Image: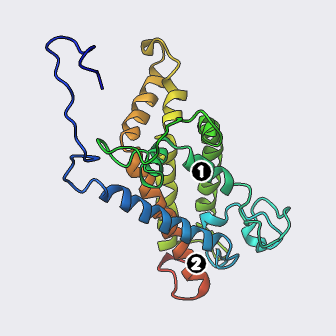
Amino acid sequence: MTSTATRPRGARARAAIAAKTLRTDRWWFAPLITVIGLSAWVAYATVRVFMHDFYWVADYHYLTPFYSPCVTERCVEGASHFGRFLPGWWIIPDAALTLPFLLLFRLTCYYYRKAYYRSFWLSPPACAVPDGHKEYGGETRFPLLGQNLHRYFFYAAAIISLINTWDAILAFHSPKGFGFGLGNIILVLNVVMLWAYTISCHSCRHIIGGRLKHFSKHPVRYKAWTFVSALNVRHMQLAWITLGTLALADFYIMALAAGWFSDLRFIN
């Protein structure tokens, strides 16, 4: 606070307010919902990843995205589209080649950083609410220094989205030939949402048009940049929607594999 001796003539001193914040609305509600939502999803995903069961429906070639690509010796042969070359130890996820990169892509995502900084770390929990920590070092130290690698995790996420797309295509070719059911709709919906979330990433937007000095000389890239920019506005919503579609696809395939109910088939 500026002292009386150094304060410019005519300037008013700051009000001495003892309260941490003068906000009277439920500013804590959004961080609380974020904690509950992310914690529930992580708990479900962790259980499913290490369950090592109910991930493949051979009758319709349904493979849950949590196990794609299935590359451990434990994997069912039909579900291993890229071979089985990792040991089948319990601690190793069956999709060990993709899950770490997907996790890092989401952890370093600009929206998710805002979400868990505000909710789990209270840094800060909301606008006009003080930070929950005495000091703020930004993203200049380990492990937050790794947030700068987000653009590289984007490339990995794009490759994984291609793999998920391939899985969704294969699901239309069951042992009986071409087939189409509710599971196909769910898998395709999940893939569409994953692509929308991936390409709406800030890094993708920068890759397409961030280095251009003259959009007029690059009309195709400009149109692509405009499209990605429109998706980027919905990046937060897409981040949550994809968590929902991933859980839905996994739960539906798990239920079919466990025999809880049968797939609603339209063709074959």
Which is more toward the observer, 109 or 262? 109
Q: Is residue 67 visible?
A: yes
Identify which residue is drawn at 42% across, 27% down.
223
Q: Is residue 62 visible?
A: no
234 above or below 80?
above
Left or right: where 231 falls relative to 202? left
Q: Secondary structure at mark 2?
A: helix
> Picture quarter containing residue 74?
bottom right
Left or right: where 10 falls relative to 263? left
Left or right: where 262 falls relative to 10? right
> Picture quarter containing residue 129?
top left
Identify which residue is drawn at 55% across, 49% down.
106
Q: How many marks?
A: 2
Which is more toward the observer, 266 or 49? 49
- Tell me which numbered mark, 2 or 1, is placed earlier along the sequence: 1
Residue 261 screen position, x and y as percent: 51, 87
Q: Name the residue that disc number 1 marks.
A: 161
Residue 254 numbered mark, or none: 2
Identify which residue is drawn at 24% across, 57% down.
26
Amino acid at the residue labelled 1:
Ser
Q: Secondary structure at mark 1?
A: helix
Residue 228 screen position, x and y as percent: 43, 35
